Image (tube, coloured by chain):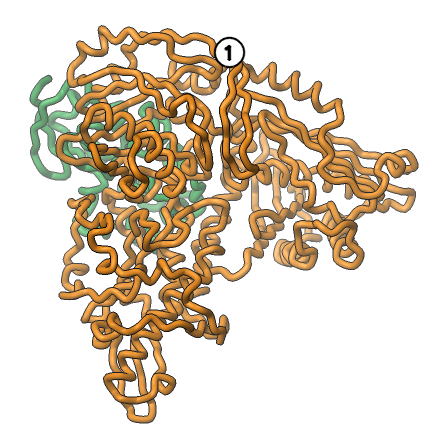
Amino acid sequence: MAAINLNVNGKNQSVDVDPKTPMLWVLREHLNLVGTKYGCGIAQCGACTIHVDGVAVRSCQLPVSVMENKSITTIEGLTENGDHPVQKAWLEHDVPQCGYCQTGQIMTAAALLSTTPNPTDEEIETAMNGNICRCGTYLRIKAAVKTAATANS
Amino acid sequence: MTLVKTTIDRRSFLKVSALAGGGMMLSFSWLAGCKPTPEEALAMPKEWFELNSYIKIGENGLVTLMSPNPEFGSNVKTSMPMILAEELDVDWKNVVVEQADFYPERFDRQFTGGSQGIRQGWKPLRTVGATARQMLIGAAAQTWNVPASEITTEASMLHHKASGKKAGYGEMASLAAGQAVPKEVSLKEIADFKVIGNSKKNVDGKNIATGKPMFGMDYTQEGMLIAMIAHPPFGMRVKSVDDTEARSMPGIKDVFIIKTLQDDYERAGFDTTTFTELAVVVGNTTWEVMNAKKALKIEFEKISDSTFVMNGWGGKQTVKVPGGLESTEGHKSRMAEMAKKSGNVLRKDGDPAAAFKKAAKVLERTYNAPFLAHNTMEPVNCFAYVTADKAELYGPTQAPDFVRNTVAARLGLPKESVHIKLPRMGGGFGLRAYGHHMVEAAVISQKLNAPIKMVYTREDDMTYGIYRPTYTATYRAALDENNNLIAFHVRGGGVPEHPIHANRFPAGAVDNYLAEGWALESNITIGAFRAPRSNFNAAAEQSFLDELAELAGKDPIDFRLELLERAKNNPVGERNDYDADRYAGVLKLVREKSNWNETQPNVHRGVSAYFCHNTYVAEVLDLSMQNNKPVFEKVYAAVDCGIVINPDAAKNMGEGGIVDGIGNAMFGELTFVDGVPEKIISISTA
């Protein structure tokens, strides 16, 4: 166990955990931020995607010990009122079916648009490729990313 | 207008007050962190008036509609309340939807599966909505002293045209709640629908997009421990567990073995048959328990042949579970052997053998399909808190009514003492009809006398069984010299069930028809998976019909339409499970919408059509080959599922189904070596 200082969603917080604990479980069980999901635990499904210094990463393979002095954003901190252009586009296209993977999808899409405001189809496919949706909502995910990109420009 | 008796679902009219003290669970408080947003809080009424189990109206006109069925992504939580809203004649803007608990004293058929949620809920929900509307009219008639027959409703308003009087539902809610439940109510004409057939957004859309807790996996409470299971490969059982290292690890509370079902327990419904003994690790946090689970040294031993009694859909029977470590290679060779022999005759029309003998051309093709895992995005999990006199469960389930019986029997509690709350499910696809996880969680909690959340790792989830079975089917067809189909023969089998629906198309369209089925026993367990059996038959049979059309020199759509015309005008046999007109209807529609006769260079075009689970679907798919790999350019789908409640959500389902079909066909294969699913081996060691 070790005390680790984190900056999550703009707030400084300290957790006392095994330094090897993946960020996913620190968020879910120590900070009660459960919007970041456990899907596979081996960085293959994308349900646990968060932003670290603005970059989309898989939190299930990220030891908490390397997270000090970094700016961590989860779905709960993406916006205060759920009105990020990606979130709005998600509602407009009514993307989710079961909904479990969608926070990870939204976090990946938001990171893409922050560096590539007007992505091509291929750029969207490449960026979103690691986020699995078992309900198969991929068509709407792509359409929503395009809508969010238009709203951005 | 249709008059219906309200007694058909009297449970729906029970009110909370009538049940006070009768096992009410309202004090059982969940997800307390889920507070209403500021805009919701402002709109919240000071007082609610309950008109029946499904409908509460606030004095300010806000309406709460209870969604009875568990939601796994098929939109029932939006669509079922839309049916209530239609007959209540309420403005959708004034509606909030709440997920009902499993509460059979108040709600009908809280089961999500078999593609029957909307179909079975249709009449009861309409009746419930119309009844509440009638009670509001009764209240207005009493207040205004006018005949009820002169009062009309529209979008949450009551009107009396002659006197010009009007009132909002909220103003009449208090008086309406005290009205006698009418014995008979009239339902709207379909042409008058305003809510049904107009797309509404998913009522949980914003909560999903902002990551609010709503899944079983998200649940927590004070003092809750985390539990994980370890199970053997198929064909083995846990012999012993060396937990020395695991017990010494941080945060670990206990390690033990549980028996999930007693040996003499008579299984029924969705009871599973996979593993009745599991090793369990319990600790403070998921990460700690996950690590301790890896440190367990478990010795397995082979099981020998055994039997259990299943009081299932087909009556009571003894099911044999063979011993042995099964592999895909073994399945394939045993299936190939079986496929050479006759199976059980499921249907026979005319004289197929004679027809094949005199055929001008015969086509034979065999299609195989592997085991598939559901792989829901949310791994299996369940919260349980079992005390001396009751059990509280919260976990993803499609079939709470069934699992309640199993849990009650296993814990030795009356079933009324088993309370189940229904979280949103992170996918289901049939898997979550099987309630083994709820039994396991309950047994663990009972042993510890503590609240626990049991969580499967992804590997546990994928290796537990309840798979789509592996199937094979050999089709033979005979054409005469004029390329007419004169005989059709299908012989299908699988492990451990065959896939054949003998009375489906093209049965009824061919004079000489034979369907046979066979099955091999297995200790690998299977379960419902997105239209069980049909998900294989549709692809196999339609691929075959396509090749047959080619052999006959006919357009594949015309060929099918010819057969359907025959089935309509002069059907063979009487048990044909389809409506030839509706079948032909989707084929004609997809032909038109896809501009079927237009071809593009290097794009291959194919068609298929299938009917199952009350829905007719025809699809045209455009495929190209790039770098020797198939690329799916476009799919056109025509769907006839009857009245559509929420069109955009139905479209979403269709899109997802097509994507899932392609995905599983290309990548889903699950193979086994010595009772262990192979893909998992590679994932675990990655």
Question: From what the image shows, is residue A112 above or below residue B366?
Answer: below
Q: Residue at x 24, y 28 (%)?
A: B445
Residue type at mark 1: give it.
Ser
Image quadrant in which the C terminus of chain B is located: top left
The subunit carrying tag 1 is B
Question: From what the image shows, is residue B112 above or below residue A26?
Answer: below
Spot occupied by residue B578 in the image (x, y as percentages of width and height): 66, 52
Q: Report which quarter residue B213 is drawn in.
A: top left
Q: Residue at x 53, y 26 (%)?
A: B669
Q: Report which quarter residue B236 is drawn in.
A: top left
Residue A125 appears in the figure: no
Spot occupied by residue B172 in the image (x, y as percentages of width and height): 23, 76
Between B656 and B353, the one lying in front of the other is B353
Estimate how packed mark 1 is, as few (under 14), some (14 to 19) or many (20 or more) residues with alpha carbons within 10 Å.
few
Chain coloured green in this rendering:
A
Chain coloured orange in this rendering:
B
Along the horizontal axis of the image, is B565 left or right of B401?
Answer: right
Q: Residue at x 36, y 66 (%)?
A: B85
Residue position marked by numbered label 1 in the rendering = B304
Along the horizontal axis of the image, is A51 left or right of B673?
Answer: left
Between B30 and B268, the one lying in front of the other is B268
Spot occupied by residue B443 in the image (x, y as percentages of width and height): 29, 27
Question: From what the image shows, is residue A42 above or below residue B216?
Answer: above
Between B626 and B584, the one lying in front of the other is B584
Along the horizontal axis of the image, is B138 left or right of B523?
Answer: left
